């Protein structure tokens, strides 16, 4: 009976530990520690301009000397998304527009986007030493890990964008949040296990 009671206690303890990990797994995805940097990089993939507006807010607060807005070269209705982004910046950034550049990207994944970010930052004079990335909160840990590994010549920090349409915490309170949670953990694990050691 003592052995059975001990086994039950171990199973219960492991169950509680597993639940605790699952409970906090959504928090683990988020790294919101912006540092004042030479450049701000707004990653592509924004579906409602919230990444852009957060980046612009940080630029105005002095977190960067200039800002790069990633936009794809894909075309729609005769123009690229990068061209649409340039027009939008000219209209919306006002006094900050001269500090903002469009970084045209040709790849879709964050790992591939890192190569385009390297190119855009490398063409900047004076060459920046640090960069602050801006992306959705659930994406920050993976994006920060990727850019730190693939563009290591800069010191990176991250600012998280809160978008309740896509993600929130606790992650199981909303179907869309749960989908984002599972999808992002899948991509984070793929990066850690298979992509992080490749060059």
Image (cartoon, grey):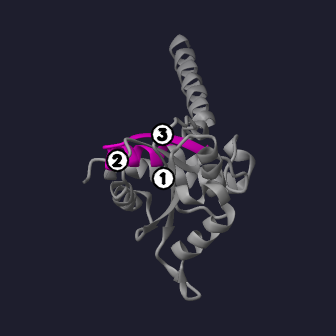
Mark before the other along the chain sequence, 1 or 2 = 1
Residue at the location (36% across, 42% down)?
A: 154
Residue 61 point in image, percent of width and height: 63, 41
Q: 122 left or right of 36?
A: left
Q: Which residue is label 3 attached to?
A: 37
Q: Dot 2: what SS?
A: helix
Specify whether residue 108 is in view. Answer: yes
Depicted 14 relative to depicted 131: above or below: above
Question: Is residue 157 located in the magenta-colored stretch of the structure?
Answer: yes
Question: Residue at position x 33%, y 55% from top?
Answer: 122
Q: Does residue 179 appear in the picture of this structure? A: no
Furthest residue in direction bottom, as rendered = 78
Gap between marks 1 and 2, in whole Å?
11 Å
Quadrant of the rendering where the N terminus is positioned: top right
Question: Is tag 1's residue or tag 3's residue first in the polypeptide sequence?
Answer: 3
The quadrant holding residue 2 is top right
Task: Indicate whether 6 appears above or below 151.
Answer: above
Relative image position of residue 40 (x, y in whole percent) = 51, 48
What separation in Å lies between label 3 and label 2 (alpha carbons)?
Answer: 30 Å
Tag 3 secondary structure: loop
Give the residue at mark 2: 193
Residue at image x 52%, y 35%?
Answer: 35
Magenta stretch bounds: 141-160
Q: Earlier in the sequence, mark 3 or mark 2?
A: 3
- Residue 56 location, x and y as percent? 62, 52
């Amino acid at each position: 009976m003592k052995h059975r009671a001990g086994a039950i206690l171990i199973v219960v303890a492991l169950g509680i530990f597993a639940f605790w990990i699952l409970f906090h797994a959504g928090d683990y995805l988020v790294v919101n520690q912006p540092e004042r940097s030479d450049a701000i990089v707004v990653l592509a993939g924004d579906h409602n301009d919230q990444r852009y507006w957060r980046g612009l807010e940080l630029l105005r607060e002095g977190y960067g000397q200039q800002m790069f807005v990633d936009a794809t070269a894909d075309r729609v209705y005769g123009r690229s998304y990068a061209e649409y982004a340039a027009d939008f910046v000219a209209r919306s950034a006002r006094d900050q527009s001269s500090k903002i550049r469009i970084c045209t990207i040709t790849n879709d994944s964050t790992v591939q986007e890192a190569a385009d970010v390297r190119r855009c930052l490398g063409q900047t004079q004076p060459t920046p030493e640090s960069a602050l990335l801006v992306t959705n909160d659930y994406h920050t840990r993976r994006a920060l890990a990727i850019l730190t590994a693939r563009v290591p010549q800069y010191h990176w920090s991250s600012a998280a964008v809160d978008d309740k349409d896509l993600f929130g915490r606790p992650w199981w309170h909303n179907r869309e949040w749960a989908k984002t949670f599972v999808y992002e953990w899948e991509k984070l694990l793929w990066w850690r296990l298979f992509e992080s050691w490749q060059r």
